[in-house]
Amino acid sequence: MASSEGLRKRRKTESKAEVIGSDSGSSHNKDPVDWWDEFCRRVNGNLSPTKVLDSFKSVFRVSRKTFGYLCSLVKEDLISKPGKFMFKDGTVLSLCDQVAVSLRRLGSGESLGIIGDAFGLNHSSVAQITWRFVEAMEKRALHHLRWPDNDSNMDMIKSKFEKLSGLPNCCGAIDVTHILMNLRASDPTNELCCDHGKNHSIVLQAIVDSDMRFLDIVTGWPGKMNESLIFQNSSFYRLCREGKRLNGKLGEYIIGDSSYPLLPFLITPYEGGDLSEPRAEFNKRHQEVALVAQMALKRLKDNWGIIHGVMWRPDRHKLPRIIFVCCLLHNITLELEDVVLGELPMSNSNHDPGYRQQVCRVSDPEGVSLRDKLTLELSAGFRA
């Protein structure tokens, strides 16, 4: 969730969104409609009839309003760096062109070759343009992914989770997903990324709010690491242990599945098949919250194809930064395009096919006590 300062910045840039910043290269003060029409003519000329560009959102994974906001966000960085990129016909890429190429690369997951051939660009230009965009987003969009910075924002999250599941004081849901890679088997260092499913992967751990926005992420750990260990090495875990995140006096916590330890600030479900009615009811409510994180990760991978499927020999040092920017884009589209949880299907939330849930047997007595207290409260409310 963005901070109040970040939201003020966003409102200012939203007012400029329809005047997309295209005053670099050969495009000065060009109307966005004219830019899109010209872009389509140029690109469609390089595509077969079955692959002609369709709607704006199907190509870039964002609305025109969001596209305009992204252009204004990265404008200063993309036009201030030396060097100009040109299409094969000699036309200099405008700011809009650079953002368009980057979003197409991140959204489709198509290879540099396919995008370069379709857009009339050298393959190396696609890579350089996309990386410049990633660096600019890291710098300019950080306010779109941060832990709530005031009680009012957190109270809103807790209220929405309680309305969804009946669980009070829930501040988020945590889950992980694997980003798959096709790496050289001949390189012994790649064995570090070989996970339990015999794939090369790195892990993305995400904590989401009641609207599926990412509040905290950790990525870059090899796929073989279990969820519990990744969590316990995160800054979120350390801050909670130090009392600097989640208010223990208010009984604040996040929800996680059985692969996580049961802690005073992380509540997991009851294990076992023969549960009492109150415990079964608690697990049902718990799953309703956990599903929000699953849906967020599914939406992330579906919208940003570069991290969906198997990445072809990526730079392992750059990949975590690309994942981070995809998470920023996920949050921005939720904020600017007014997508709400109730409008999305609650099924088909499997974001990590082929991976089985691990089980962590660690439980803190204070976590056990809080879970039992929540179960009793839900049971009393259910009987009433």
Image (cartoon, helix red, strand yellow):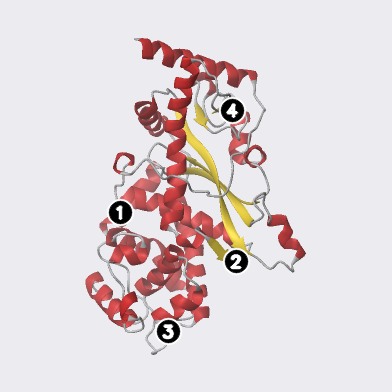
* SS state under label 2: loop
Which comes before the other along the chain, label 2 or label 1?
1
Name the amino acid, label 4: Gly
Foreground label between 1 and 4: 4
List the residue tagged with mark 1.
12
- At x 42%, y 55%, the residue is 302
Foreground label between 3 and 4: 3
- At x 34%, y 81%, the residue is 48
**Mark 1 nearby-residue class (10 Å; few <14, some 14–19, many ≥20):** few
List the residue tagged with mark 2.
314
Toward the viewer: 235 or 209?
A: 209
Toward the viewer: 281 or 107?
A: 281
List the residue tagged with mark 4.
243
Which comes before the other along the chain, label 2 or label 4?
4
Gap in Å between the C-alphas at discs 2 and 4?
38 Å
List the residue tagged with mark 3.
86
- Residue 369 lies, with reference to residue 143, above or below; the image says above
Which comes before the other along the chain, label 3 or label 2?
3
Gap in Å between the C-alphas at discs 3 and 2?
25 Å
Number of dots carrying numbers: 4
Name the amino acid, label 3: Met
Outermost bottom residue: 89
Name the amino acid, label 1: Lys
* SS state under label 3: loop
**Mark 4 nearby-residue class (10 Å; few <14, some 14–19, many ≥20):** few
Outermost front residue: 274
Gap in Å between the C-alphas at discs 3 and 1?
31 Å
**Mark 3 nearby-residue class (10 Å; few <14, some 14–19, many ≥20):** some
Instruction: Confirm or deny contact between disc 2 and disc 1 (CB under 8 A).
Output: no
Q: Position of residue 85 (x, y in %)?
A: 45, 81
Q: Position of residue 363 (x, y in %)?
A: 65, 24
- Residue 132 lies, with reference to residue 319, above or below; the image says below
